[in-house]
Amino acid sequence: MSGNNDDAFHRTGSFRRVLPPGNDTTGISGIAVKSTNTNNTYINEQYIPFFLEYTLMSEFNILSKKLIPGVYVIPADKTPFIWFGVIFPRYGLYKNGVFRFRLLIDKNWPNCDYPKVIFETPLFHPLVNPDTGEMSIQYHFPEWKKGVSRIWHVIDHVSKSFYDIPRTKTPENLEAAELLKTDNEKYMKKCEDCVKQSQIDIYKQPMHSENIDPNYLLFDVYDEEIHGTLRRSWLQQKENDNKTQNLSWVQPGSLEPFSRSNT
């Protein structure tokens, strides 16, 4: 999860398996299948899935620590190569929208191109193909560099694309690109309609087979009887935290910290 949780990611199942010791010393991040020893031997093939999952676990832990505002991401339970995400834009033309997406990672990771970003929620945006929902990020990542380019870079770029809308020469949505350039008022109206529709679509059940997963992000309509108690406990906890904050004190007219009047 990104943006709302400091806890390290712990995957049930294969992430808890331990690799037997070996002679290969290649680092986990950016692991190469081919061994670096002089005999030109290869890592046992049965170990490769373990290395792939550990590198992706590392990528997710990095993302979790970045705390990208308004973004929630979690890997699928059934496969580490699909991550589910939701973006809640906090300001700008898409404010109050709820846009669900999937991150598809190539199974040759990390020896592959950048991950694909597919929006399940219809998104009127110059970079998003209106038919497939795929967001074009190629112009921002013309070359995906193993060990340098990170998955969190992709998520961060996608999030920023909601606020700083690029005027690209190769848009995926020609109508959106043209309106952005020639008719801001109509573009804003399209975004407003897009936001309203997203608030309806977010309650729909998954339509893709890969979304039939325990970690797929589902939303329920707010019900006071079900959610009210939990909401109030959160608000009470926040109020208590604010009351217990330790504040420094400075006597008015003095530059000395912790100074206090004698009267």
Image: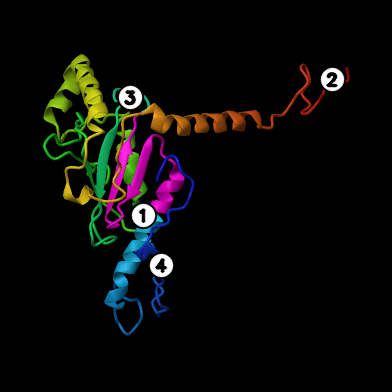
- Relative vertical location of residue 234 with respect to residue 41 in this rendering, above or below: above
- The amino acid pointed to by label 4 is Gly
Left or right: residue 31 compared with residue 173 = right
Question: N-terminal of the two: label 2 or label 3?
Answer: 3
Q: CA distance from mark 3 to mark 1?
A: 32 Å
Q: CA distance from mark 2 to mark 4?
A: 60 Å
Q: Which structural element holds mark 2?
A: loop
Return the residue at label 4: 27
Please tell me which residue is depicted at 79% across the width and 26% down the height of the picture. 256
Q: Is residue 74 magenta?
A: yes
Q: Which structural element holds mark 1?
A: loop
Bounds of the magenta segment: 60-89
- The amino acid pointed to by label 3 is Lys
Q: CA distance from mark 2 to mark 3?
A: 48 Å
- Across and down, in percent, residue 17 comes to 39, 69
Left or right: residue 67 compared with residue 75 = right
Q: Which structural element holds mark 3?
A: loop
Return the residue at label 1: 148
Is residue 7 or residue 40 the one in the foreground? 7
Return the residue at label 2: 261
Is residue 27 or residue 14 the one in the foreground? 14
Return the residue at label 3: 95
- Pointers 4 and 3 in contact (C-beta within 8 Å): no
Q: Residues within 10 Å of mark 3 (few under 14, many from 20)?
A: some
Residue, far top: 185
Question: N-terminal of the two: label 3 or label 1?
Answer: 3
